[in-house]
Image (cartoon, coloured by chain):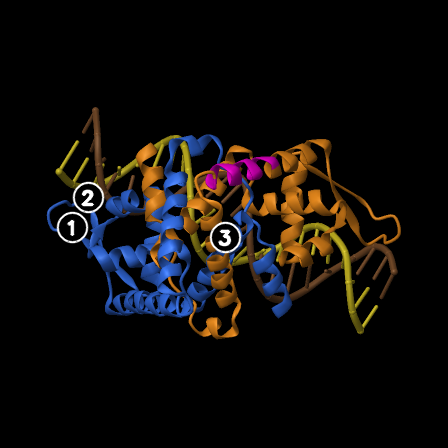
Chain colours: A blue, B orange, C brown, D yellow
Amino acid sequence: MLQQLFQLTVVMSGAMDEDLAARGLTRARATLLTLLYNHGPTIQSELARAVGASRRNITGLVNGLEASRLATRRPHPSDRRALLVALTPRGSSAAAALARDERALARYLFKTVTAAELKALTVSLQQLLTRLDDPAFAALRTCALRRWPLDRRRAARR
Amino acid sequence: MLQQLFQLTVVMSGAMDEDLAARGLTRARATLLTLLYNHGPTIQSELARAVGASRRNITGLVNGLEASRLATRRPHPSDRRALLVALTPRGSSAAAALARDERALARYLFKTVTAAELKALTVSLQQLLTRLDDPAFAALRTCALRRWPLDRRRAARR
DNA sequence: TATTGTTATACTCTATAACTATA
DNA sequence: TATAGTTATAGAGTATAACAATA
């Protein structure tokens, strides 16, 4: 069961990365893109706080988004130290497409799952999430993420 | 529900990475470590095939394991082109600890889940995995991995 | 003094190509 | 000719430290 959970984690994670790469995005940049889409123009240190990355890191990620013409920097109106990062129209479209396709994925994935199963699954997952959030978990959490399943698929495609 | 699945993915993935870092390992190196633990001494190109990485990449990862004194390279007895990678005693201990702690994690996570719930969860997860393996999925798969939950935890700790 | 964003530096993972030694 | 492993080179993410400009 834990192996299944790992496998699901690995497969979903890998699928996301591949899809993002096809869109010319990385996971870190997509995270920022979605954040900017949901929250509107934001200064970099706020982005760093929201995402849990260093300010240095945000500089690099925003550079990447800017190079792809998905976001721009402009001076903050009242704080001359700060820079407001905002999505370009192209960035907004990309973020909207991401959100739309995510909903399509959900419909696809759960098409064959009955309402009762979905309910049970939701309860169980919530229970697991609660367990994972428990402070007692910190002393236990561990285990390498198994990558074989996905990587074997990748290897087969070569 | 998909959000929960994402969150579970993110939390587990982040927890794994943090735990591995505490052990002086990265995910890629832990993958190799476990592979070597389960399969015994293996040549690098076989590792590359098994993990789905390039030979070049394996060179770097084995360098890392060697620098941490977790693995060693030795000549292949019959093929003078090849190098056999094997775990040191220290590497075996590390891999064994990883496997042991993984079992402890499973016991902890599913302690509060009843047998019936576990059965249902297993069935549902397997169904999702099957959906994810469907070729039709390739056309749909997408969506940025949400990192906020974990990253907020990280940020809070600073 | 504290905060904002940058440069500087370093490490890891990944990828492609070219090269060598051997099969 | 093909395979094994390496070097060379590059880009991405992350991290810390030091710095200039501003609050």
x then y, percent, for residue A53: 35, 43
Q: Residue at x 44, y 68 (%)?
A: A22
From the image, state whether disc 1 or disc 3 is nearer to you. Answer: 3
Secondary structure of the residue carrying numbered label 2: loop
* Residue A115 falls within the magenta-colored stretch: no
Q: To which residue does mark 3 refer?
A: B119
Q: Chain of mark 1?
A: A
Q: Which residue is mark 1?
A: A76
Asked if residue A127 is positioned above or below residue A115 in the image, the reply reads above
Left or right position of B59 against A105: right
The front one of B72 and A131 is A131
Between the residue at mark 1 and the residue at mark 3, the CA separation in whole angstroms equals 55 Å
Q: Position of residue B103 (x, y in %)?
A: 57, 39
Tell which of B119 and C17 is nearer to you: B119
CB-based contact (under 8 Å), mark 2 and mark 3: no
Binning the other alpha carbons within 10 Å of mark 3 as few (below 14), some (14 to 19) or many (20 upward) gives few
Question: Does the segment drawn in magenta span residue B107?
Answer: yes
Q: Are marks 2 and 1 in contact (CB under 8 Å)?
A: yes
What is the chain identity of the residue bearing mark 2? A
For this orientation, the residue located farthest to the front is B116
Q: Tell me the residue that label 2 is attached to.
A: A81
Q: Are marks 1 and 3 on the same chain?
A: no
Q: Residues within 10 Å of mark 1 (few under 14, many from 20)?
A: some
User: Would you say residue A116 is visible in this rendering?
Assistant: yes
Specify start and end residues of the magenta stretch as a single range: B100-110
- Could you tell me residue A133's position as x and y percent? 37, 38
Give the residue drawn at x 51%, y 60%: B126
